[in-house]
Amino acid sequence: MKENYYERLLNINTTGNENWNRATAHNHPYEPTLYEALDTLCENYILEENDHIVDFGSGKGRIIFYINHFFRCYANGVEMNEIYYNESLLNKSKYIQKNKKMEDKINFYCNLSQNYDIGPKDNKFYFFNPFSVQIFMKVVENIMQSFEDYPRNMDLIIYYPSDDYIQFLEYRTPFMLEKEIVLDELYKNDDKEKFVVYSLKTNY
């Protein structure tokens, strides 16, 4: 299984799903993106070494380590759950044993996503339904404010997009649909099993 292969390759432990009974009105339980889905994403979406990706609701850090390993880019994880945040720090300590040059390119923050201070170089933002549309709206508003302060091309990468997320982006933001990556080899009967990329560019 790719789950075991990548966990060994990256020298981390990010497996396990959280029970939906522990979900709150605004924050959804931990569920890591499958490595097979990430493989499909990265076959169709390329990152550069100077990109700065932010994973909102980063859990134990799977996205961060996978993206950094294959693209060598900067990666920040934002996680409100202190237990998962501490596990991501433990995973980082194990990951950099094999990737010492990457230590300064990876950071984790124990914070509410809506309170994360968007850095002037942050330009890629990953979401896997981590929270309600109300929080998503606030995070995207922060991203748009950062765009106004420091204009640069930006992408929102959303896995398993909710209708509420899409409606907000389509009707209330200047972000435009750039790419849709359907996971038809993994899931044949669920039209939400896909990645969508929404872009905001300085030349729009």
Image (tube, rainbow, N blue to C red):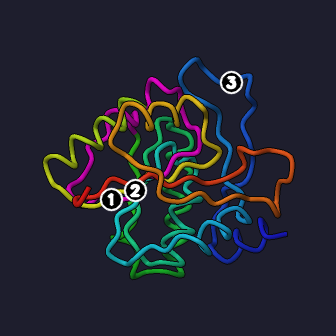
Of the 4 image quadrants, the one containing the N terminus is bottom right
Q: Is residue 61 above or below residue 85?
A: below
Q: Which residues are magenta?
A: 111-136
Element type at marker 2?
Answer: strand
Q: How far apart, in angstroms, are the residues tagged by discs 2 and 3?
A: 30 Å
Amino acid beneath label 2? Asp
Figure quadrant of residue 144: top left
The answer to which of 68 and 168 lies nearer the viewer is: 168
Figure quadrant of residue 115: top left
The label on residue 66 is: none
Q: How far apart, in angstroms, are the residues tagged by discs 2 and 1?
A: 6 Å
Q: Is residue 184 above or below residue 44?
A: above
Q: Is residue 4 left or right of residue 107?
A: right
Is 143 contained in the magenta span?
Answer: no
Q: Position of residue 67 (x, y in %)?
A: 52, 69
Q: Position of residue 138 (x, y in %)?
A: 35, 30
Q: Which residue is mark 3?
A: 22
Element type at marker 1?
Answer: loop
Tell me which numbered mark, 3 or 1, is placed earlier along the sequence: 3
Q: Which residue is mark 2?
A: 155
Q: Position of residue 53 (x, y in %)?
A: 40, 60
Instruction: Farthest residue to the top: give it.
Output: 25
Tell me which numbered mark, 2 or 1, is placed earlier along the sequence: 1
What residue sits 74% from the left and 22% below the top? Answer: 21
Figure quadrant of residue 134: top left
Amino acid beneath label 3? Arg
Q: Are marks 2 and 1 in contact (CB under 8 Å)?
A: yes
Q: Are marks 3 and 1 in contact (CB under 8 Å)?
A: no
Q: Which residue is mark 1?
A: 123
